[in-house]
Amino acid sequence: MKIKAVFLFLIVTAITMLLSCFGTEPSQSSSTGGSGSEVVGVVKYPDSSADAGNALNKRIMTQPLAGSNVFIHPASYLAEYGSQDIPKAVTDTDGFFRISNVLPGTHYVYIKDAKGNGVLREINVTDEPKTFDLGILLTEKTASARIQYSGNASDDVLFYLSLRGTGLTVACTGKGVFTSITEIPVDTDVDYMFTVQMKKPFNAGYDIKNIKLLPGVIITLDDITDNLLNH
């Protein structure tokens, strides 16, 4: 009877952990719908030439990031592994984009190219519709984050690492093996949140909050341990 009671306690603990992890972060799955505010901006590459001059000239002497996808998600959005990140706009030849019908709430707007450059901005949309002009957004090198499981489970492990507010998520199927989210568009003013979802050998999860990312830098998150998954 004691063994059965302990087993049931562990199951309840795991379920409670999942609910506390994901139930405390309610979120729309989409940032747009109906009528509402709009977000506009212009995305450019910074000038890297040696004679670009002062900061003002560098801002003027830039090349637009044309034909790139623009994404927007609620800041607490949690992507499903394998889901497709669908853009809401595409930059034109001048780097300009417009996202219409943005719902109230906190959202991440981000753009990235195929060469490891990108930019992200956090916006807070109120109930009163308005236009949010992000101005000129200069791209920077994207960042990366990695993590591994170092608990006591066997090598039959499956967990997902996801970056809240984006469509970025990766899976890992090995113990003691690093899994990495790469090409993360960076805003150094944003506190990023990662979510770990353990699927095997048991179901549990938790959030890793207040992470700062820097352009071109790979950060290593603290290892996933059993006490984190079952606290």
Image (cartoon, rainbow, N blue to C red):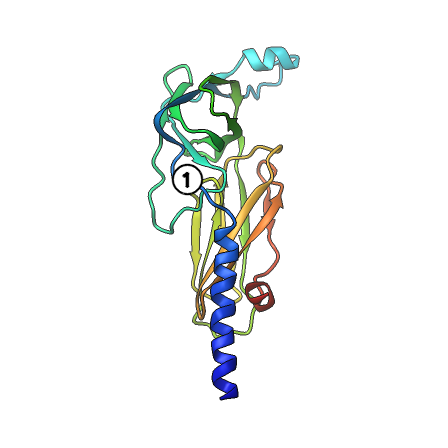
Residue sticking out furthest to the bottom: 1
- Mark 1 surroundings: few (<14), some (14-19) or many (≥20) residues within 10 A: some
Q: Position of residue 144 (x, y in %)?
A: 53, 44
Where 230 sits versus 70, above or below?
Answer: below
Where 81 sits versus 214, above or below?
Answer: below
Identified by mark 1, the residue type is Gln
Q: Residue at the location (62% across, 11% down)?
A: 56
Q: Residue at the location (40% across, 22% down)?
A: 36
Tell me the quarter of the picture where residue 97 sits: top left
Where 179 sits versus 119, above or below?
Answer: below
What SS does tag 1 mark?
A: loop
Q: Position of residue 119 (x, y in %)?
A: 51, 30
The one nearer the camera, 186 or 86, is 86
Tell me the quarter of the picture where residue 93 sits: top left
The residue singled out by tag 1 in the image is 28
Q: Position of residue 74 (x, y in %)?
A: 46, 37
**What is the number of callouts on the image?**
1
Where 169 sits versus 41, above or below?
Answer: below
Q: From the viewer's perspective, tell me whether residue 173 is left or right of residue 177.
A: left
Q: From the viewer's perspective, tell me whether residue 6 is left or right of residue 94.
A: right
Q: From the viewer's perspective, tell me whether residue 91 is left or right of residue 125.
A: left
Q: Residue at the location (47% across, 77% down)?
A: 8
